[in-house]
Image: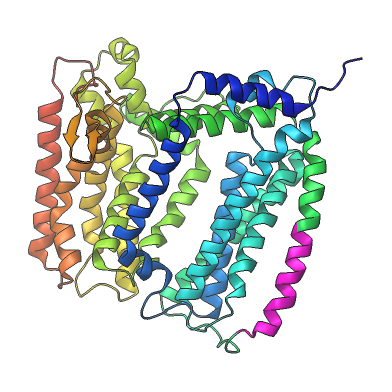
Amino acid sequence: MTAVVALRPVRRWIRRTQASHRDRGELLGTVYTVVFSVAVIAVMAQDTLKAVFSPLVPHLSGAGALAAATVCAGLLFLTLRRLGPVTVSRPAAYFLLTAPISRRRLLSPALRAAAFGAGLAGAAAAFGILGNAVASGSSLLVATGALTGVLLTLVASAAQSRPRLASLTDAAARVALALGLAVLVAEATGWTPPPAGGEIATSAVVPVTGALTVLAAAAFLLGVRDLARTPDHEILESAKTAGTLADSVYGIEPSFLAEMLERRYWARRRLRSVTLPRSLPPLTGQDLLLARRRPARLLWTAASTTMPLLLAGAPRWVLTIALLTGTVIAARATTATVKTDAGNPVLLRLLGLTSRQVVQQRLWVPAVIGAVWATVALALLQLAGTLPSGQWWLLGLAVGPVGAASAVRAARAGFVRNDLIPIDTPMGSVPTGPVVYAFAGVDLLILALPTVIALVRDVPLTPAMIAVQFAAAALGIRAYLSWTTGPERVGLSAS
């Protein structure tokens, strides 16, 4: 019989061994850098933070505030489910997960950290909703939001070890998210919800907050006791997710996370052979098949067309950035194949296709998806009366292909080049590779400059502006194909 070893001496030995290979003050230096960076960013963006958390003119009604809280809770729960929430570091997963030590003591720090982070996120969401609500509420609702975040963490932890509960809670979170977005969109389009009863009394919030406190404490104790039931494969999967996310942030390499998500999605799918449409070019048919095999992503893409409408009350530059960003993200639905072609052009050589033919064929599906997304988003803004007079939805037909070209160029960029010479600034060295990688694809959004000018200036849209946008999109994409591809070259990496 294997004897259980105390975990604390093992962790102490690991920390001492790690400390012997580090420079003195390295941890303090890291903490100082993080805290100082957060403080500087908070000071620089204090006006933006005030506009987000406490605008001068609140616009959320009682139903809107409840819908916003539902959306925040759904997003927080789905994020926790994707991250674990019970996880360990990758070295601990390799060496301590199978060791004869207490599983509860090994996993409880992760549960505490996840509950603390979710509590902070819930408090921030409650504070922002209170600042944007027309009816004032008690400041104790911030504590209620924090306790809700802790309870969502414990529910996600319980779902991690119970597949049926996981599927049920995930479906409930998606439904709640969809209903909350529907209420917010309805209110943004002119629906008048029933009037609220006025300010929420503190005497009504205190017992609710107290009951949630007792419930959260009891649930946390039960959650710690239940940690031993968490399967190894769930812990390993969450450890890979957290480790890959940390690598992506530390190395400024988002392709690590994107590739992991793609591999994980397709590994869980049972695929069957399907004949590609003969009426379409082969690579376009492959992209169309790829989009059809991800219906959930298409549904969320369709639902995200309402995001610019929800930002109608924000400054025009925020609305413009949201429109362009949403178009590019929608167009990236099938650009993973472009990244594969750029890294391994074996299939292209077998098909006898040149780089120009490949990019032309790969552009069709992203261009259609981006055009539909931008057209629907602008049509919703126009129907809600947010935009001046004019046929704004026509601009989506031109902005969509621009977003597709931006997404394809970003996919062709490959990995971050860390061999480039860094840039010396008074605040330290700035690595050149991540900066170049971050702007890969963003530079092509200059082709949407006519739309940006029309939205920022908030002037009526004329047919001449629409014609200029279509001409800029057509000429710009044509120039991009001519300069970055060739009729005799196969490789796609040089974009």
Q: Nearer the viewer, residue 290 or 279?
A: 290
If the image is split into quadrants, where does the C terminus sit?
Answer: top left
Q: Nearer the viewer, residue 205 or 34?
A: 34
Instruction: Give left or right: position of 410 versus 120.
Output: left
Q: Nearer the viewer, residue 370 or 171?
A: 171
Q: Nearer the viewer, residue 150 or 32?
A: 32
Part of the protein shown in magenta:
200-216
- In the image, residue 310 lies at what x, y percent? 40, 67
Q: Main secondary structure of the magenta part?
A: helix
- In the image, residue 33 lies at what x, y percent? 38, 41
If the image is split into quadrants, where does the N terminus sit?
Answer: top right
- In the image, residue 305 lies at what x, y percent? 39, 58
Q: Residue at x 27, y 68 (%)?
A: 315
Spot the residue most to the front: 24
Magenta stretch: includes residue 209? yes
The answer to whether residue 269 is seen in the rendering is: no
Magenta stretch: includes residue 241? no
Instruction: Give left or right: position of 462 versus 24.
Output: left
Q: Residue at x 41, y 75 (%)?
A: 189
